[in-house]
Amino acid sequence: MKLFFHFSVIGFSNTYLIGNNDGGAAILVDPGHMDLELLKLIEDNNYYIKYVLLTHRHASHTKGLKTLSKIYDVEIFANSPHIHDFPVRIVSDDSHMNLAGFDISAFLIPGHSSDSMVYKISDALFTGDVLMAGRIGSTSTSLSRSLLLRSIREKILPFDENTIIFPGHGTPTTLGIEKIINTDLMPHRHGSKHVLTGNNPEFS
Amino acid sequence: MFDFIRCSHPGCNEFAVTKYTTCFQHAENPESLQQEAAAKLLEKGIVGSYCLTHGEFSNLDLSKSSLYACKFSHGTFQDIDFSDSYIQLCFFEFSTFINCTFHEVTSKYSVFAGSEFRECSFTGSDILHSNFSGITASHTVFDDSDLYYTNFSSSKLSHVSFKDCNLKKADFYLSERQEVSFKYSNFEEALFFREN
Protein backbone atom coordinates (compact mmCIF):
# COMPACT_ATOMS: atom_id res chain seq x y z
CA MET A 1 0.00 0.00 0.00
CA LYS A 2 1.24 3.45 -0.90
CA LEU A 3 -0.26 6.53 0.66
CA PHE A 4 0.21 10.12 -0.41
CA PHE A 5 -0.90 13.22 1.43
CA HIS A 6 -2.13 16.31 -0.38
CA PHE A 7 -2.98 19.58 1.34
CA SER A 8 -5.20 22.17 -0.21
CA VAL A 9 -5.04 25.78 0.96
CA ILE A 10 -8.61 26.10 -0.29
CA GLY A 11 -10.55 24.79 2.69
CA PHE A 12 -7.28 23.81 4.43
CA SER A 13 -8.24 20.20 3.92
CA ASN A 14 -6.32 16.97 3.41
CA THR A 15 -6.80 14.65 0.47
CA TYR A 16 -5.30 11.17 0.54
CA LEU A 17 -4.22 9.12 -2.46
CA ILE A 18 -4.07 5.39 -1.78
CA GLY A 19 -2.78 2.90 -4.29
CA ASN A 20 -0.84 -0.27 -4.82
CA ASN A 21 2.94 -0.28 -4.99
CA ASP A 22 2.96 -0.75 -8.77
CA GLY A 23 0.42 1.88 -9.82
CA GLY A 24 -2.97 1.26 -11.46
CA ALA A 25 -6.41 1.85 -10.00
CA ALA A 26 -6.29 4.07 -6.93
CA ILE A 27 -8.53 5.58 -4.27
CA LEU A 28 -8.86 9.25 -3.42
CA VAL A 29 -10.22 10.19 -0.01
CA ASP A 30 -11.96 13.60 0.17
CA PRO A 31 -11.00 15.53 -2.97
CA GLY A 32 -11.65 18.95 -1.48
CA HIS A 33 -9.82 20.65 -4.30
CA MET A 34 -8.42 19.22 -7.52
CA ASP A 35 -5.31 21.08 -8.57
CA LEU A 36 -2.26 20.47 -10.74
CA GLU A 37 -0.20 19.34 -7.78
CA LEU A 38 -2.66 16.56 -6.97
CA LEU A 39 -2.96 15.57 -10.63
CA LYS A 40 0.83 15.35 -10.85
CA LEU A 41 0.93 13.20 -7.72
CA ILE A 42 -1.55 10.80 -9.30
CA GLU A 43 0.01 10.66 -12.75
CA ASP A 44 3.68 10.63 -11.69
CA ASN A 45 2.97 7.54 -9.61
CA ASN A 46 1.20 5.78 -12.51
CA TYR A 47 -2.22 5.82 -10.92
CA TYR A 48 -5.66 6.55 -12.24
CA ILE A 49 -8.47 7.36 -9.84
CA LYS A 50 -11.16 4.76 -9.93
CA TYR A 51 -12.75 5.22 -6.51
CA VAL A 52 -13.50 8.21 -4.33
CA LEU A 53 -14.31 7.82 -0.64
CA LEU A 54 -16.05 10.80 0.94
CA THR A 55 -16.00 11.19 4.70
CA HIS A 56 -18.93 13.65 4.50
CA ARG A 57 -20.61 16.02 2.11
CA HIS A 58 -19.10 19.37 3.19
CA ALA A 59 -17.58 21.40 0.35
CA SER A 60 -14.00 21.40 1.68
CA HIS A 61 -14.03 17.60 1.22
CA THR A 62 -15.99 17.29 -2.02
CA LYS A 63 -15.52 20.36 -4.20
CA GLY A 64 -12.76 18.79 -6.28
CA LEU A 65 -15.20 16.17 -7.60
CA LYS A 66 -16.30 18.37 -10.47
CA THR A 67 -12.81 18.65 -11.97
CA LEU A 68 -11.82 15.13 -10.94
CA SER A 69 -14.80 13.59 -12.74
CA LYS A 70 -13.80 15.34 -15.97
CA ILE A 71 -10.40 13.63 -15.84
CA TYR A 72 -11.24 10.20 -14.46
CA ASP A 73 -14.27 7.94 -14.58
CA VAL A 74 -14.76 7.68 -10.85
CA GLU A 75 -17.12 5.77 -8.62
CA ILE A 76 -18.08 7.80 -5.55
CA PHE A 77 -18.76 6.24 -2.16
CA ALA A 78 -20.45 8.23 0.61
CA ASN A 79 -23.20 8.02 3.18
CA SER A 80 -25.08 10.98 1.72
CA PRO A 81 -27.13 10.36 -1.44
CA HIS A 82 -26.66 13.94 -2.66
CA ILE A 83 -23.13 15.11 -3.48
CA HIS A 84 -23.20 17.91 -6.06
CA ASP A 85 -25.63 15.82 -8.18
CA PHE A 86 -23.06 13.08 -8.77
CA PRO A 87 -24.29 9.48 -8.61
CA VAL A 88 -23.20 8.05 -5.28
CA ARG A 89 -22.90 4.50 -3.99
CA ILE A 90 -24.27 4.66 -0.48
CA VAL A 91 -21.99 3.33 2.24
CA SER A 92 -23.78 2.23 5.38
CA ASP A 93 -22.56 1.85 8.94
CA ASP A 94 -20.29 -1.09 9.72
CA SER A 95 -20.03 -2.11 6.08
CA HIS A 96 -17.12 -3.66 4.25
CA MET A 97 -15.91 -3.42 0.68
CA ASN A 98 -12.89 -4.19 -1.42
CA LEU A 99 -11.70 -1.42 -3.71
CA ALA A 100 -8.49 -1.43 -5.76
CA GLY A 101 -7.45 -4.54 -3.85
CA PHE A 102 -7.83 -2.95 -0.41
CA ASP A 103 -10.21 -4.23 2.26
CA ILE A 104 -12.10 -1.25 3.61
CA SER A 105 -14.35 -1.02 6.66
CA ALA A 106 -16.74 1.90 6.98
CA PHE A 107 -18.30 3.35 10.12
CA LEU A 108 -20.99 6.00 10.43
CA ILE A 109 -20.00 8.50 13.15
CA PRO A 110 -22.64 11.27 13.11
CA GLY A 111 -22.31 14.53 15.04
CA HIS A 112 -20.19 16.87 12.94
CA SER A 113 -22.56 16.03 10.10
CA SER A 114 -25.25 13.41 9.83
CA ASP A 115 -23.34 11.59 7.08
CA SER A 116 -19.86 11.51 8.66
CA MET A 117 -18.04 8.31 7.79
CA VAL A 118 -14.72 6.91 8.99
CA TYR A 119 -12.92 4.47 6.70
CA LYS A 120 -10.40 1.90 7.91
CA ILE A 121 -7.83 0.58 5.48
CA SER A 122 -5.19 -1.71 6.97
CA ASP A 123 -3.87 0.08 10.09
CA ALA A 124 -5.04 3.53 8.98
CA LEU A 125 -8.24 5.37 9.82
CA PHE A 126 -9.42 8.16 7.54
CA THR A 127 -11.47 10.17 9.99
CA GLY A 128 -12.54 13.27 8.04
CA ASP A 129 -13.89 15.80 10.53
CA VAL A 130 -14.80 13.22 13.17
CA LEU A 131 -11.47 13.02 14.97
CA MET A 132 -8.41 15.19 14.42
CA ALA A 133 -5.12 15.70 16.24
CA GLY A 134 -6.04 17.14 19.63
CA ARG A 135 -9.73 17.64 19.00
CA ILE A 136 -12.98 16.21 17.75
CA GLY A 137 -15.07 17.70 14.95
CA SER A 138 -17.09 20.85 15.49
CA THR A 139 -20.77 20.43 16.25
CA SER A 140 -23.70 22.79 16.17
CA THR A 141 -25.48 21.58 19.29
CA SER A 142 -24.58 19.90 22.57
CA LEU A 143 -26.70 16.94 21.48
CA SER A 144 -24.61 16.54 18.32
CA ARG A 145 -21.46 16.74 20.42
CA SER A 146 -22.71 14.02 22.75
CA LEU A 147 -23.64 11.87 19.77
CA LEU A 148 -20.23 12.38 18.20
CA LEU A 149 -18.37 11.57 21.43
CA ARG A 150 -20.45 8.46 22.04
CA SER A 151 -19.89 7.18 18.51
CA ILE A 152 -16.13 7.82 18.74
CA ARG A 153 -15.96 5.95 22.06
CA GLU A 154 -17.97 3.01 20.76
CA LYS A 155 -16.56 2.65 17.27
CA ILE A 156 -13.11 4.27 17.12
CA LEU A 157 -11.44 4.03 20.51
CA PRO A 158 -11.62 0.21 20.66
CA PHE A 159 -9.06 -0.01 17.84
CA ASP A 160 -5.52 -0.55 19.03
CA GLU A 161 -3.25 2.33 19.93
CA ASN A 162 -0.94 1.92 16.95
CA THR A 163 -3.77 2.72 14.56
CA ILE A 164 -2.76 5.72 12.46
CA ILE A 165 -5.27 8.53 12.04
CA PHE A 166 -5.37 10.58 8.86
CA PRO A 167 -7.84 13.40 9.47
CA GLY A 168 -9.60 15.74 7.06
CA HIS A 169 -7.83 18.74 8.54
CA GLY A 170 -4.55 19.12 10.39
CA THR A 171 -1.73 16.74 11.12
CA PRO A 172 -1.65 12.95 11.18
CA THR A 173 -1.78 11.31 14.58
CA THR A 174 -2.34 7.91 16.18
CA LEU A 175 -5.09 6.55 18.36
CA GLY A 176 -2.58 6.09 21.19
CA ILE A 177 -1.73 9.79 21.07
CA GLU A 178 -5.35 10.88 21.00
CA LYS A 179 -6.31 8.68 23.92
CA ILE A 180 -3.71 10.48 26.04
CA ILE A 181 -3.62 14.03 24.66
CA ASN A 182 -6.99 14.82 23.10
CA THR A 183 -8.75 16.94 25.72
CA ASP A 184 -12.07 16.69 23.88
CA LEU A 185 -12.09 12.97 24.65
CA MET A 186 -11.54 13.61 28.35
CA PRO A 187 -14.52 13.92 30.67
CA HIS A 188 -13.70 17.44 31.93
CA ARG A 189 -12.41 20.02 29.50
CA HIS A 190 -10.51 23.11 30.59
CA GLY A 191 -10.02 26.11 28.36
CA SER A 192 -6.73 27.94 27.96
CA LYS A 193 -6.11 30.48 30.68
CA HIS A 194 -3.39 32.25 28.77
CA VAL A 195 -4.29 35.72 27.60
CA LEU A 196 -2.59 37.46 24.72
CA THR A 197 -1.78 40.99 25.72
CA GLY A 198 0.74 43.51 24.57
CA ASN A 199 2.39 43.35 27.98
CA ASN A 200 2.98 39.62 27.89
CA PRO A 201 6.75 39.04 27.76
CA GLU A 202 6.25 35.96 25.57
CA PHE A 203 5.22 38.12 22.64
CA SER A 204 7.44 41.17 22.97
CA MET B 1 4.90 3.06 2.17
CA PHE B 2 3.13 1.81 5.27
CA ASP B 3 3.62 -1.84 4.50
CA PHE B 4 4.11 -2.51 8.18
CA ILE B 5 3.21 -5.88 9.66
CA ARG B 6 2.38 -6.70 13.26
CA CYS B 7 4.76 -8.46 15.62
CA SER B 8 4.29 -12.24 15.59
CA HIS B 9 4.76 -12.51 19.37
CA PRO B 10 1.44 -13.61 20.92
CA GLY B 11 -0.54 -10.67 22.29
CA CYS B 12 1.84 -8.01 20.96
CA ASN B 13 0.30 -5.17 18.92
CA GLU B 14 3.55 -3.45 18.01
CA PHE B 15 4.67 -3.23 14.41
CA ALA B 16 7.45 -5.65 13.50
CA VAL B 17 10.87 -4.36 12.58
CA THR B 18 11.09 -4.04 8.81
CA LYS B 19 12.09 -7.37 7.20
CA TYR B 20 11.61 -9.22 10.51
CA THR B 21 8.63 -10.95 12.06
CA THR B 22 8.84 -9.49 15.56
CA CYS B 23 9.05 -6.04 17.04
CA PHE B 24 12.26 -4.71 18.53
CA GLN B 25 11.29 -5.73 22.06
CA HIS B 26 10.56 -9.33 21.07
CA ALA B 27 13.53 -9.75 18.76
CA GLU B 28 16.06 -12.45 19.56
CA ASN B 29 18.94 -10.06 19.06
CA PRO B 30 17.68 -6.49 19.37
CA GLU B 31 21.20 -5.10 19.51
CA SER B 32 21.96 -6.25 15.98
CA LEU B 33 18.64 -4.85 14.70
CA GLN B 34 19.56 -1.50 16.13
CA GLN B 35 22.99 -1.58 14.52
CA GLU B 36 21.38 -2.58 11.23
CA ALA B 37 18.99 0.37 11.47
CA ALA B 38 21.79 2.78 12.30
CA ALA B 39 23.83 1.50 9.37
CA LYS B 40 20.84 1.93 7.04
CA LEU B 41 20.29 5.49 8.25
CA LEU B 42 23.98 6.33 7.90
CA GLU B 43 23.91 5.34 4.23
CA LYS B 44 21.96 8.60 3.76
CA GLY B 45 20.00 7.31 0.81
CA ILE B 46 16.22 7.56 0.75
CA VAL B 47 14.82 5.49 3.60
CA GLY B 48 11.18 4.61 3.01
CA SER B 49 8.64 2.57 4.92
CA TYR B 50 11.13 1.52 7.58
CA CYS B 51 9.96 0.55 11.05
CA LEU B 52 11.91 0.14 14.26
CA THR B 53 10.15 1.28 17.42
CA HIS B 54 11.69 1.51 20.91
CA GLY B 55 15.18 1.82 19.41
CA GLU B 56 18.03 3.70 21.06
CA PHE B 57 20.31 5.77 18.88
CA SER B 58 23.18 8.02 19.91
CA ASN B 59 26.06 9.97 18.40
CA LEU B 60 25.01 9.65 14.77
CA ASP B 61 25.46 12.08 11.93
CA LEU B 62 22.18 11.70 10.05
CA SER B 63 22.43 15.06 8.33
CA LYS B 64 21.00 15.22 4.79
CA SER B 65 18.92 12.08 5.35
CA SER B 66 15.64 11.50 3.55
CA LEU B 67 13.02 9.65 5.55
CA TYR B 68 9.62 8.80 4.09
CA ALA B 69 6.82 7.00 5.94
CA CYS B 70 9.12 5.61 8.61
CA LYS B 71 8.17 4.64 12.13
CA PHE B 72 10.64 5.20 14.98
CA SER B 73 8.08 5.62 17.78
CA HIS B 74 9.10 5.29 21.45
CA GLY B 75 12.73 5.76 20.43
CA THR B 76 15.58 7.44 22.23
CA PHE B 77 17.75 9.79 20.20
CA GLN B 78 20.76 11.37 21.85
CA ASP B 79 23.35 13.60 20.16
CA ILE B 80 21.92 13.00 16.69
CA ASP B 81 22.47 15.48 13.90
CA PHE B 82 19.43 15.55 11.59
CA SER B 83 20.50 18.82 9.92
CA ASP B 84 19.32 19.44 6.38
CA SER B 85 17.22 16.26 6.43
CA TYR B 86 13.88 15.68 4.75
CA ILE B 87 11.29 13.95 6.93
CA GLN B 88 7.87 13.19 5.49
CA LEU B 89 4.99 11.19 6.98
CA CYS B 90 7.28 9.78 9.68
CA PHE B 91 6.24 8.76 13.18
CA PHE B 92 8.46 9.56 16.17
CA GLU B 93 5.70 9.75 18.79
CA PHE B 94 6.51 9.19 22.48
CA SER B 95 10.25 9.41 21.82
CA THR B 96 13.02 11.15 23.71
CA PHE B 97 15.35 13.56 21.94
CA ILE B 98 18.37 14.82 23.88
CA ASN B 99 20.78 17.34 22.41
CA CYS B 100 19.63 16.69 18.84
CA THR B 101 20.12 19.14 15.99
CA PHE B 102 17.42 19.62 13.39
CA HIS B 103 18.98 22.66 11.71
CA GLU B 104 17.31 23.48 8.39
CA VAL B 105 15.26 20.30 8.27
CA THR B 106 12.07 19.92 6.29
CA SER B 107 9.39 18.03 8.17
CA LYS B 108 6.01 17.47 6.55
CA TYR B 109 3.04 15.58 7.96
CA SER B 110 5.25 13.96 10.59
CA VAL B 111 4.38 13.05 14.15
CA PHE B 112 6.49 13.84 17.21
CA ALA B 113 3.55 13.97 19.64
CA GLY B 114 4.07 13.00 23.26
CA SER B 115 7.84 13.19 22.88
CA GLU B 116 10.36 14.84 25.13
CA PHE B 117 12.89 17.31 23.73
CA ARG B 118 15.84 18.42 25.83
CA GLU B 119 18.35 20.93 24.50
CA CYS B 120 17.34 20.42 20.88
CA SER B 121 17.61 22.89 18.03
CA PHE B 122 15.21 23.24 15.10
CA THR B 123 16.59 26.54 13.77
CA GLY B 124 15.91 27.62 10.20
CA SER B 125 13.58 24.70 9.52
CA ASP B 126 10.36 24.13 7.60
CA ILE B 127 8.23 22.14 10.01
CA LEU B 128 4.92 22.06 8.20
CA HIS B 129 1.74 20.30 9.14
CA SER B 130 3.56 18.29 11.81
CA ASN B 131 2.26 17.00 15.12
CA PHE B 132 4.07 18.11 18.29
CA SER B 133 0.99 17.89 20.51
CA GLY B 134 1.62 16.87 24.09
CA ILE B 135 5.39 17.26 23.82
CA THR B 136 7.54 18.27 26.77
CA ALA B 137 10.30 20.57 25.57
CA SER B 138 12.98 22.34 27.56
CA HIS B 139 15.86 24.52 26.43
CA THR B 140 14.85 23.98 22.83
CA VAL B 141 14.99 26.44 19.96
CA PHE B 142 12.71 26.76 16.92
CA ASP B 143 14.00 30.21 15.82
CA ASP B 144 13.71 31.30 12.16
CA SER B 145 11.43 28.37 11.34
CA ASP B 146 8.25 28.01 9.34
CA LEU B 147 5.79 26.20 11.61
CA TYR B 148 2.74 26.48 9.36
CA TYR B 149 -0.18 24.35 10.60
CA THR B 150 2.02 22.59 13.16
CA ASN B 151 0.29 21.41 16.32
CA PHE B 152 1.77 22.14 19.76
CA SER B 153 -1.51 21.74 21.65
CA SER B 154 -1.30 20.42 25.22
CA SER B 155 2.47 20.75 25.14
CA LYS B 156 4.65 21.73 28.09
CA LEU B 157 7.25 24.22 26.97
CA SER B 158 9.97 25.53 29.23
CA HIS B 159 12.75 27.82 28.00
CA VAL B 160 11.66 27.33 24.41
CA SER B 161 12.27 29.96 21.76
CA PHE B 162 10.04 30.60 18.73
CA LYS B 163 11.70 33.84 17.61
CA ASP B 164 11.02 35.09 14.09
CA CYS B 165 8.89 32.09 13.15
CA ASN B 166 5.92 31.76 10.84
CA LEU B 167 3.17 30.64 13.21
CA LYS B 168 0.25 30.82 10.79
CA LYS B 169 -2.29 28.19 11.86
CA ALA B 170 0.16 26.80 14.45
CA ASP B 171 -1.83 25.43 17.38
CA PHE B 172 -0.80 26.17 20.98
CA TYR B 173 -4.18 25.39 22.57
CA LEU B 174 -3.81 24.34 26.20
CA SER B 175 -0.03 24.58 26.02
CA GLU B 176 1.79 25.32 29.27
CA ARG B 177 4.50 27.85 28.61
CA GLN B 178 7.28 28.99 30.90
CA GLU B 179 10.03 31.26 29.65
CA VAL B 180 8.80 30.92 26.07
CA SER B 181 9.50 33.63 23.52
CA PHE B 182 7.52 34.38 20.36
CA LYS B 183 9.45 37.58 19.64
CA TYR B 184 9.20 38.83 16.01
CA SER B 185 6.79 35.97 15.17
CA ASN B 186 3.24 36.34 13.86
CA PHE B 187 1.69 34.86 17.00
CA GLU B 188 -1.59 36.65 16.14
CA GLU B 189 -2.10 34.05 13.39
CA ALA B 190 -1.49 31.12 15.75
CA LEU B 191 -4.23 29.43 17.71
CA PHE B 192 -4.16 29.80 21.49
CA PHE B 193 -7.90 29.53 22.14
CA ARG B 194 -10.77 27.61 20.63
CA GLU B 195 -14.33 28.64 20.16
CA ASN B 196 -17.02 26.21 21.30
Image (spheres, coloured by chain):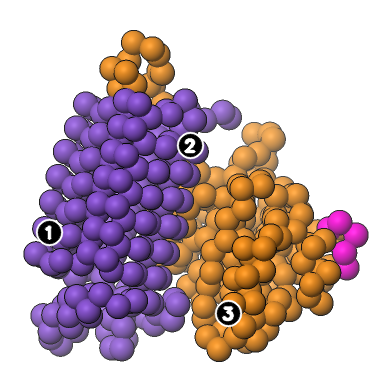
Chain colours: A orange, B purple
Image height of B137 relative to B104, above or below = above
Residue at 21% x, 26% y is B179
Q: CA distance from mark 2 to mark 3?
A: 31 Å
The alpha-carbon separation of the residues under discs 1 and 2 comes to 30 Å
Furthest residue toward right: A85
Disc number for residue B168: 2
Q: Secondary structure at mark 3?
A: loop
Residue type beneath disc 2 = Lys
Which marked residue is nearer to the observer: mark 1 or mark 3?
A: 3
What number is the disc on residue B78? 1
The image shows residue B36, relative to residue B54, as above or below, that is: below
Which chain is indicated by disc 1? B
What is the span of residues highlighted in magenta in the rendered image? A83-87
Q: Is residue B169 visible?
A: yes
Q: Chain letter of disc 2?
A: B
Q: Chain of mark 3?
A: A
Q: Position of residue A9 (x, y in %)?
A: 61, 48
In reply to whether residue A85 is colored magenta, the answer given is yes
